[in-house]
Amino acid sequence: MRAGARLKARCFVHRVDLAPGGRRATGVSYLDAQGRHRTQRADLVILAPSAIETARLLLLSATSDHPHGVGNRSGQLGRNLMFHFFTLAFAQFAQDVHAWRGPSTTITIDDFFGPDFPPAAKQAGLPYLKGGICETGRHR
């Protein structure tokens, strides 16, 4: 952000936009916080949402040059994803560590949410949305 990047909060990116020929990303298409369809052009596009969300976004970005999704020529995009489940952790400290002050961990849970059929999905041209975030702090 110090170099000029802008953070747009509460937006849902649903497509990586490509230049003709499909060899270079030119920006993204997204829904803004009010559900309006927007595009953002960029000199450089970096995808770093998570393993699940990166695969989802690349699959949604299919074009005539990439009919099965960007980077999915082999048909394996997202198919061999593995998770390391860490279901319980605890610790005891001699001093107060203020565990209730914000989330201590944020993880993506895709198995127990949706599909949901909100207006945002329809506006993005999607059949539904699936995914979710679970934040844990002091309490489950």
Image (cartoon, rainbow, N blue to C red):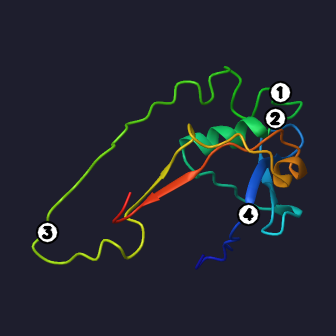
The disc label shown at residue 18, or none: none
- Determine the CA span between mark 1 and mark 4: 25 Å
Give the residue type that dot 1 points to: Pro
Instruction: Point out residue 123 in the picture as x, y percentages from the top left corner.
Output: 89, 52
Q: Looking at the picture, does residue 8 appear above or below residue 22?
A: below
Q: Which quadrant is the N terminus positioned in?
A: bottom right
Q: What element carries label 4?
A: loop
Q: Is residue 113 left or right of residue 127?
A: left
Q: Which quadrant is the C terminus positioned in?
A: bottom left
In which image quadrant can residue 10 be found?
Answer: bottom right
Question: Disc 2 or disc 4, which is closer to the eye?
Answer: 4
- Dot 2 or dot 1, earlier in sequence: 2
Q: Looking at the picture, does residue 75 appear above or below residue 106?
A: above
Question: Disc 2 or disc 3, which is closer to the eye?
Answer: 3
Tell me the residue that label 3 is attached to. Answer: 93
Q: Looking at the picture, does residue 9 appear above or below residue 21?
A: below
- Determine the CA span between mark 2 and mark 3: 50 Å
- Determine the CA span between mark 3 and mark 1: 54 Å
Q: Are marks 2 and 1 in contact (CB under 8 Å)?
A: yes
Give the residue type that dot 2 points to: Ala
- Dot 3 or dot 1, earlier in sequence: 1
Give the residue type that dot 3 points to: Phe
The disc label shown at residue 62, or none: 2
Question: Disc 3 or disc 4, which is closer to the eye?
Answer: 3
Mark 2 nearby-residue class (10 Å; few <14, some 14–19, many ≥20) = many
Residue extending farthest to the top is 74
Tell me the residue that label 4 is attached to. Answer: 11
Tell me the residue that label 1 is attached to. Answer: 67
Front one among 22 and 119: 119
